[in-house]
Amino acid sequence: MGTTVLLVDDHELIRQGLARAFERDDEMTVVGQAGTLAEGVAAWETLQPDVVVTDLQLPDGHGLDVVRAIRATDDSTGVVVLTMHAGDDHIFAAMEAGASAFVGKDTRASEVVSAAKHAAVAPRTFLCAGLSQAVMRRATSPAPPKLSGREAEVLTLLADGLGTGEIASSLYMSESTAKTHITHIYQKLGAANRAQALVTAMRLGMLDHAAPQRF
C-alpha cells in the first residue's frame, strides 16, 4: 500500500483534488477523508495513517488542534498543515504544535505530495514548503546579526534537528561549549527557544533552506 494518507479539509473540491494528486503517485495511498476537526481526529484514531494532511481553518476548530491531538500520544505520524495563511506567526505556531510540514495552498499539488513524503520519513522535523522565500521577501528587518563562524555552524546543525549533545559531538566540543554557542545565537536573534531562533533565521535569510525542526 505504500505510504497511507488522511486528508482533512472542509472543502470537498480541495480534498478531491489532493486525492487525485496523491493517487498519481504509486508510493502514496489516500485511505480516508474528513471535513471537520472532530472527523479528522476520529479518522486518524481509526485509520492510523502514516501522514495526515490538514487545512489550518476547519469549521469546528483549528488545524493545529489536529496536530496537537496527534502529538499528544504519537510521534510517528507525519502531519502536514495546508493553508492560505503564510504569515510568520502561523509558521511558528505550526512548528510549536509539532507539525512536520507547512505548505501553502497556492503551491503545486506535487509540493503537497512531496511534503507528505518528507513527513512520513521524518515526522518530527519541520519543512516549510513553498513559503520560506516569500516570508523572507516580506521581511522588513535590518541586516541579520553577525554570527561567528562557529555559531553559524551550530545554527546549521540546529536547523538539521540535532540536539545539544549531538552538536557537541559533531563539532568536537564539550556540551557546555555547545550550550554557550546556542545561548549566544538565541541572544543575537532575540529568540527564547530553538523554534523562534529558526523562524527568525529563516526570515532573515540566514538559512539556505526551510529549516527542519526536531521536537
Image (spheres, helix red, strand yellow):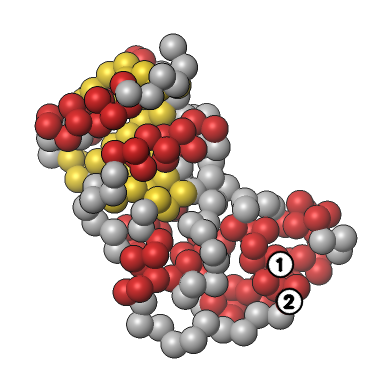
The residue that label 1 is drawn on is 153
Residue 47 x %, y %: 36, 15
Q: Nearer the viewer, residue 57 or 24?
A: 24
| Amino acid type at mark 2 | Gly
- Identity of the residue drawn at 58% across and 81% down: 188
- Is residue 131 depicted above or below 146 in this figure? above
The crowd level at tag 2 (other Cα within 10 Å; few <14, some 14-19, many 20+) is: few
| Amino acid type at mark 1 | Glu
- Identity of the residue drawn at 87% across and 60% down: 172
Q: State the image quarter where residue 156 is shown.
A: bottom right
The crowd level at tag 1 (other Cα within 10 Å; few <14, some 14-19, many 20+) is: some
Q: Is residue 1 left or right of residue 174?
A: left
The residue that label 2 is drawn on is 149
Question: Do the residues bearing badges 1 and 2 touch, measured as CB atoms within 8 Å?
Answer: yes
Q: Please identify the residue farthest to the bottom as the structure is shown.
A: 142
Q: Quadrant of the N terminus?
A: top left
Q: Nearer the viewer, residue 164 or 81?
A: 81
